[in-house]
Structure formats: C-alpha cells, structure tokens
C-alpha cells in the first residue's frame, strides 16, 4: 500500500466519522427523549384511575357535613418528584422512594406511579382545576363537579439530556369528560432533544 492510498483511506474514514458521530449523538438523545411521553402516559393512566375509582374505605361512614361521593377524586395539591443533585442531566438517576418526603410519596402512590427504573426526567403533576372535598388522612379531594372540558391537570417532564443547562419540557394536559378524564392526543414539547 502506498502513502497516497493510505492517506485516501484515512480521509474516507475521517469523513465517515464526521458524519456518523453527530448522527449517533442525535440518535442517543432521541432515544433518551422517548422516556418522557411514555411516562406522561403512565401518569395519565394513574390520575384517570384515581378519578374513576371508588375510594370508599372499609368501615368508613360519612359523618355530618361529609360527602358520600367517593368518586371523581383528584390530588389535593401539586405533586413533584424530587430532582437529582444538580438537576436532571445526561445520566439517569434513581428515585429513593423510602427517603422521599411522605407527602410526595403518598401523592404518587395514590395515582399508582412508582418508577423503579432510573429516569432522565423529573416529573410533576400540576393541579390546574378540580373541586371537591378533601378526604381526611389522604392526599386527595373527592366529589369533583368540574364541567366537561374543564382542565384539571398538567403533567410535565423536564430534562436536560445533554447537560448543557438548556432544559426540555414535555407537557400533557388533562381535562374532565363526564365521569372520567381525557388527555390531549399529543404531547406538547419545547426543545425536545435538549
């Protein structure tokens, strides 16, 4: 092999690497970003299930002034998973459910959300509507009388997949539909691959 042939091969390999490396990095960010819409869907299933199920407790008889309506329940206040040290970044983090604040743990348990796999994003459940009576000893209110079409939650995922300080946002809006909840068909996103 001559020097010219060797230089030609090195040049071709360099060009291929210049094309492949950025494409691979972009592919990795897109694959990491797929977590957010999936987990927002899981959060939606949890809040919809809470809204539709009967939460009557064994032996609980509504007292004076209490509501007998134990359906159409929603979280009483916003819920947010704790952020990893330094905020979300390019590395996954694992939630410490045992060390988490009791209120936060109880909120996410009420909607059957317990991520056991490490996460790239921080998730929040923002209460933007809903009425009802607080249920003593729980993190929820029941007897919601919101009209069909009224918003009730914004589910959000915030991340920074390349750790450059610019965060991406995914948001799923949830509203009331009769005795259940509905979600927007799509997930809103800002800077999805950041």
Image (tube, helix red, strand yellow):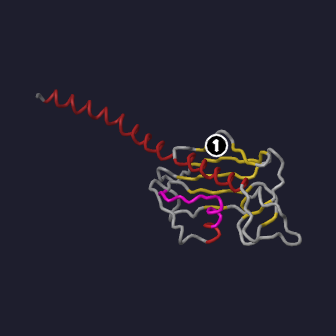
Instruction: Return the x and y of residue 24 as percentages of the image width and height.
Output: 39, 40
Q: Which residues are the magenta region?
A: 106-118
Query: Camera-side residue: 170 or 12?
Result: 170
Q: Secondary structure at mark 1?
A: strand
The residue furthest front is 59
Query: Camera-side residue: 44 or 19?
Result: 44
Instruction: Return the x and y of residue 54 as percentages of the image width and height.
Output: 73, 58
Image height of 45 relative to 16, above or below: below
- Are there few (<14), some (14-19), or many (20+) residues within 10 Å of tag 1? some
Residue 94 magenta: no
Horizontal side of residue 96 vs 176, given as left or right: left
The residue depicted at 74 percent of the width and 64 percent of the height is 56
Q: Which residue is mark 1?
A: 188
Instruction: Return the x and y of residue 55 as percentages of the image width and height.
Output: 73, 62
Query: Camera-side residue: 73 or 92?
Result: 73
The residue furthest left is 1
The residue depicted at 78 percent of the width and 61 percent of the height is 70
Q: Main secondary structure of the magenta part?
A: loop
The residue depicted at 68 percent of the width and 53 percent of the height is 49
Instruction: Return the x and y of residue 175 as percentages of the image width and height.
Output: 75, 47
Query: Camera-side residue: 34 or 63?
Result: 63
Quadrant of the snapshot with the N terminus: top left
- Residue 91 lies in quadrant: bottom left
Residue 107 magenta: yes
């Amino acid at each position: 092999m001559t020097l010219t042939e060797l230089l030609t091969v090195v040049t071709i390999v360099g060009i291929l690497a210049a094309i492949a490396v950025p494409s691979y990095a972009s592919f990795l960010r897109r694959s990491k970003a797929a977590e957010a819409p999936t987990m927002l869907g899981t959060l939606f299933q949890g809040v919809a299930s809470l809204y539709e199920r009967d939460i009557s407790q064994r032996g609980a008889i509504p007292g004076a002034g209490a509501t007998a309506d134990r359906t159409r329940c929603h979280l009483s206040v916003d819920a947010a998973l704790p952020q990893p040290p330094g905020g979300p970044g390019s590395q996954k983090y694992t939630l410490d459910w045992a060390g988490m604040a009791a209120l936060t743990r109880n909120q996410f348990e009420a909607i059957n959300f317990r991520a056991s796999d490490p996460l790239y994003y921080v998730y929040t459940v923002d209460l933007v509507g809903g009425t009802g009576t607080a249920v003593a000893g729980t993190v929820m209110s029941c007897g919601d009388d919101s009209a069909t079409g009224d918003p009730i939650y914004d589910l959000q995922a915030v991340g920074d997949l390349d750790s450059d300080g610019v965060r991406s946002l995914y948001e799923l809006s949830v509203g009331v539909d009769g005795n259940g909840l509905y979600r927007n068909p799509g997930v809103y996103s800002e800077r999805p691959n950041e």
